[in-house]
Amino acid sequence: MAEKIQMKVPLVEMDGDEMTRVIWQQIKDILLTPYIDLKTVYYDLGLKKRDETDDRITVEAAEATVKYGVAVKCATITPNAQRIKEYNLKQMWKSPNGTIRAILDGTVFRTPIIVKNIKPFVKTWERPITIARHAYGDVYKGVEMKITAKGRAELVFTGEDGRESREVVHDFAGPGIVMAMHNMDKSIKSFARSCFNYALDQKKDLWFAAKDTISKVYDHNFKDIFQDIYDREYNEKFSDAGIEYFYTLIDDAVARVIRSPGGFIWACKNYDGDVMSDMVATAFGSLAMMTSVLVSPDGHYEYEAAHGTVTRHYYQHLKGAETSTNPVATLFAWTGALRKRGELDGAGSLEQFACELEQAAVHTIEEGIMTKDLAVLAEGEKRMVNTRQFLEEVNARLGR
Ligand code: NAP
Ligand code: MG
């Protein structure tokens, strides 16, 4: 065998849980370590280890990402009441993704992996649509109240000097509900910069959509911050790269997205991004074909699959059954991270290997060999294989 590809700087490797943890090891064994002198700084974010370390390990992994710049993460369990019993946990640890996002202060970009024999449900879509989701605030940090009687609800802001400003929310004649939410200019600015940087990195147009006609202060603030940063810092860079940025109303964006050929980045506020990324993923075919990358405004990257730990398949695996779980999004998390590492370190052979590995995976599916989730969607001749067989088929096509 030819000499292995060398790495200059290690990747931050975050291992995870259940079926994706099994796939993680298979990917390394079959497709990575035979070809690369794989250097990683390893963090086990499996639930057991998080519990043992009082979740310190997650914080350390995020800090290492800030230090080294590029991380690859396996899907992890976000504990709920049932998991506390199953793993006998000390407490209901927070979502690792939430912890990592809070430390990196990033934006999550989700992009579908496209193959010729799986046609999107939207006929006009030819190229991937990337959703950029603001990962802070709004309804996710909302404060809610049930109103049970007649009375006035108000928004009150008390300055440090004790001065108050007020807005009447509603004079209730009877029972109802009320909610307050917030965001911070600092977070919106990093969201905007992450989007502009990623658009330049990918050489793709950037759309941003919100509802400023109705939300004249809140959404308007997002729109103004984007425009201001664009005008001052990115206008020229975008023209040089031959790409454009524009703002439009979210309802207009939805109509345009459906009629478009794809190939752009759509920046969304937190809730819009949550909903639209599921819509786009499903319309392109499968959640198992969606990649996700967290990009911080300082240019740190964390790559992962958009799906979870595929628990149902894991329980089958534990019973000794072979499963046909799709490893493509997890594989693309690895290739995305390796390519970025290669790019940053001027390691052309690493970049090239990452591209070839992605092509080999796409060719495998396009030649009709695929896991069960895709077999129900794909056109033409197909053969369903289990996860290990799929990875071996990819390996057979690597460097062909
Ligand atoms: P999930 O793991 O994404 O799986 C949901 C269902 O989608 C699966 O049961 C499977 O359907 C299908 N699926 C997802 N990925 C697949 C793949 N690679 N290949 C084939 N089928 C796939 O979501 P979940 O069941 O809601 O969550 C499971 C665990 O993952 C939870 O503990 C949750 O906290 C965690 N989670 C983690 C992340 C993350 O780390 N980023 C994200 C989401 C969820 P069938 O069963 O019909 O085959
Ligand atoms: Mg969602």
Image: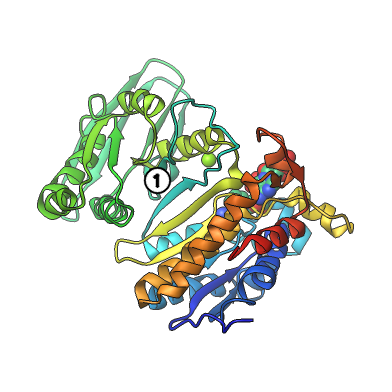
Viewer-proximal residue among 90 and 189: 189
> Label 1 belongs to which residue?
133
Question: Is residue 94 visible in the rendered structure shown here?
Answer: no
Check disc 1: other Cα within 10 Å, few if <14, some if 14-19, many if 20+: many
Q: Position of residue 250 (x, y in %)?
A: 32, 29
Q: Quadrant of residue 319?
A: bottom right
Q: Position of residue 224 (x, y in %)?
A: 17, 41
Q: Position of residue 169 (x, y in %)?
A: 30, 27
User: Is 29 on the left or on the right of 333, as rendered?
Assistant: right
* Residue at (72, 55) in percent of width and height: 390
User: Is 184 on the left or on the right of 135, as rendered?
Assistant: left
Viewer-proximal residue among 399 and 119: 399
Q: Quadrant of residue 121?
A: top right
Q: Quadrant of residue 368?
A: top right
Viewer-proximal residue among 156 and 365: 365
Q: Please tell me whether residue 147 is drawn above or below residue 226 in the rendered image.
A: above
